[in-house]
Image: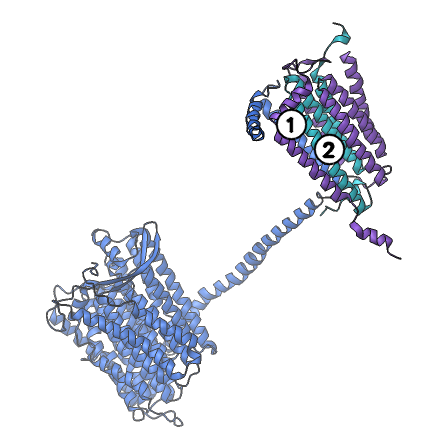
Chain colours: A cyan, B blue, C purple
Amino acid sequence: MSFLQQDVPLSWYLILSAILFSLGVIGFLIKRNLITVFMSIELMLNAVNLSFVTFARQWNEVRGQIFVFFVMMVAAAEAAVGLAIIIAVFRARSTLAVDRINLMKL
Amino acid sequence: MNASSAFPIQLGLWLIPLLPFAGFLLNGILGCRLPRWMVTVIGLLAPLGSLLIVFNATLVAASHPGITVCKGCAYQVPSYLPNVENLGHWLAVGSLHIDFSLVFDQLSLVMLLVVTGVGFLIHVYSVGYMHSDPGYARFFSYLNLFLFFMTTLVLAGNILLMFVGWEGVGLASYLLIAFWFEKPTAAAAGKKAFVVNRIGDFGFLIAIFLILAQFGTLTFSEIAAKLAANPTFTGGVLTVICLCLLFGAAGKSAQLPLYVWLPDAMEGPTPVSALIHAATMVTAGVYMIARTHFLFDRSPAALSTVAIVGAATAIFAATIGLVQNDIKRVLAYSTISQLGYMFLACGVAAYSAAIFHLVTHAFFKALLFLCAGSVIHALGGEQDMRKMGGLRTKIPITFWTMTIAVFTIAGFPPLAAFFSKDSILYAAFLQGSGGIVLWFVGLFTALLTALYMFRLWYMTFFGESRTPDAHPHESPWSMRAPLIILALLSICGGWIGIERFAAFLAPSTGALPWAAAANPRLEIALVAFAVACAIVGWRIAHVFYLRKPERAAQLAASVPLGYDLLANKFYIDELYNSVIVKPLFVVSRYILGWVVDAAILGGLAWLLAGIANLSGMVLQRWQSGNLRSYAAWLAAAAAAVLLFVLLAGSSHGWSLTLFHPEPILKLSRISIAHLGQASH
Amino acid sequence: MHLILFFLFAGFCLAGAINLLLQTHPINSALSLIVVMTSLAVLYLLLGAEFLAIAQIIVYAGAVMVLFTFVVMLLNAGREERTLGSRAAWPIGFPAVVAILAVLATILLRAQGLSAARLGEGLTNAPNQSNLVQLSQVLFHQLLLPFEVTSILILIAILGAVALARAEGSQTGAERTAPK
């Protein structure tokens, strides 16, 4: 089969997932806006979802996909509540800069 | 020899210590609020009750059906003794088992009669003597406390309970010596007594530990049984035990080198001196040696030490007593000397003779002290003999009872001490060549005893009155009655005779050394020597203090060094002060106080606090509240966990093939099936 | 064919992710994230998970990211400012990320036994059933209870979000309308 007819090795999907996850962690570390930090967390979740789907394909198990289904549900709920918290924090501190929200220091 | 099961009658021994303790509590807590007559009644009922119970026990002993004991008939002893009363468990640790057991045998019977009898008489005397003292109720509560501990000591069936009583009488002694605690000398004397006693108690404790290690038990009967089962066990550790016990006894009974507290203890009221420092507490050491005689019998070295200590103390104290001017000090040194006699008797294994002398000594020494108290009371607090004199016609009853006491202590027949002292000297003489030296020392001490006692007698009662402005009056009846009773006891107390006494005590203290072969001619010869010494001493005192009083001062001036040495008590107190007390003070204040306490311990505490503080300050900076820093540390920890799993997995042999999740899935399938069935 | 699609949409994923990091305004980051999620949906399709691909677009790109955008507009979030910064983020965080990536890459590149994927192939254990039927068979039979619990979870999340995000009650309204 020609180059274009080749199948995609599943390890490539997994490496993509790892790279996306690392990018999410970097975003969590370097971004200074609270909402952007939260978006990096969503990115991490999606990377993990990709690896779950890949493994579901690897072992022909539909439960991998069901796990992704549940992750999506929980991520949606978490996004709703997290954003509500961000709104409340903004109301209290009038800023969305991560470094200014440091009331938890000793 | 536990015969209590064969003798089911309960003697109520537990009441003997308990009644004085109840009196102590009542008078101590409520005494200041009760009227004086009620305090007196409570204070007197307690020892009277104990005395009656002791009498009852004695009569029960004497009237046991089938076996009678009467003075003078067949030397039979009642078979019911010892009567052991077990009040309950105390310690049960491993194989060590100690109960609150009270033992009533011949020895404790005799001691109890002395303690409660003389104690009761002195309680009665105190009613009159302490009449005008504001601390009246406190005095009686302390006296009752002392009786509680002393009866516990005497009745104890094991060494630990005896030690409780031992420490307790030390405490009561401290409280009573320092009774007038506002007086600095009295407070200091109380402290000195307690501290010196404590040093002796240390020896006693070491002995207890050694006995426990050696025998595994502390009950007297069990130790005696174990020793009896092992007839060849002598010397060695037993000698060490006995020497430690001797050290403890020396502290309590004021022997060399721990006698220094007794003369100072005269700061307490006179009834205290009579009860504690003449009749009962100081005899606890002798009692303890008699009680543990089975240990001492196995160690000839220890016995020799006891005898030498006793004889040395006797003559040492007698020489000091010759030149003292305080009437109570003379009696204090006399007590130390007489206790030396008792130790001498124990040292030649004549324990019954020691107890005999203890009994007679209780009578005449208590009488001497009470008479001295009467004299002091009559002169309104004067204690210096140089300021007394001519009291013979003014306080006749005191004079006559004191006379009886003085003649008794000098050893004139047929008064009490004659029998007991001569039995001691006879026992010493029989001991061999060393025994003859001891006998001679004892004889010389008898001469000195007669000398200083008659000196006291003449200076106090005879000659011109050196206090013309005093109005001496006779004591009230509460003070006179005990004097008369004690005088009667001093007269006839020795008539029981040493042989019968020893035969009675033999089951508990062992037989006399000469029980097998008595030598009546030797006895009479030694008796003659002793009486001759007493008469010589009387004669010398007569010449020096009655006929030509100035000769005493001339003699003192002609031997200034000797007189100085004696008058200053051989400078022993100063020696102890510079050799023991001062270095201890320096060590405790400078080394322990500055170096250990302030520098080391304080520095350690400062260091620990500093470390906590510093680490807190350092770690505080880690909790910055900064979200990104926390995120960074999170990521670092996640990386560490991943690395660890990778490395640990590879070291365990997991290959990097991705293993099939089938086993895990099986487990999850089963668990989910359980959940799923609920929804079907 | 599959290869081209994979490279294309994997590239979109990576581009979107890197853009999310590089943009300063949160709305730009949100739009980049939408690109990432949509590309991931296509990748799910390539892996034979059709239902999940659609669910990804409907739920994630269509609901969650819209929520994000709403919040950005509500709070009027502006460009990021230079703030105090964190002393630990760069020295400790960056090596940590590198370590994570390195470990994962090591494991994945050395793993054996991974097969390949082809577009159009579903899971091969039940070739006649569609992906949706397979999913629902497991979801509504064995995992029915967790499914219901998830719906309760979402209900709780709604209630929580409402309680957290609403204004401080009528007090604020009263303050606003009180005469000054």
**Chain letter for mark 1:** B
In 3D space, how far apart are the residues under numbered discs 1 and 2 (Cα atoms)?
31 Å
Give the side of residue A21 with respect to residue B575, left or right.
right
* Foreground residue among B320 and B344: B344
Q: Position of residue B434 (x, y in %)?
A: 23, 63
Would you place residue A103 above or below residue B23 in this image?
above
Residue lying farthest to the left in this orientation:
B74
Would you place residue B671 above or below residue B17 in this image?
above
Q: Position of residue B13 (x, y in %)?
A: 27, 67
Would you place residue C14 above or below residue B44 in this image?
above
**Chain letter for mark 2:** A
Give the side of residue B21 with respect to residue C35, left or right.
left
Question: Residue beneath label 1, please?
Answer: B643
Identify the amino acid type marked 2: Ala
Give the side of residue B397 with respect to residue B578, left or right.
left
Q: Position of residue B382 (x, y in %)?
A: 39, 86
Tell me which residue sits at (56%, 27%) in the image. Answer: B673
Q: Is residue B319 visible?
A: no
User: Which numbered tag is attached to residue A76?
Assistant: 2
Identify the amino acid type marked 1: Leu
Tell me which residue sits at (82%, 43%) in the image. Answer: A95
* Foreground residue among B58 and C142: C142
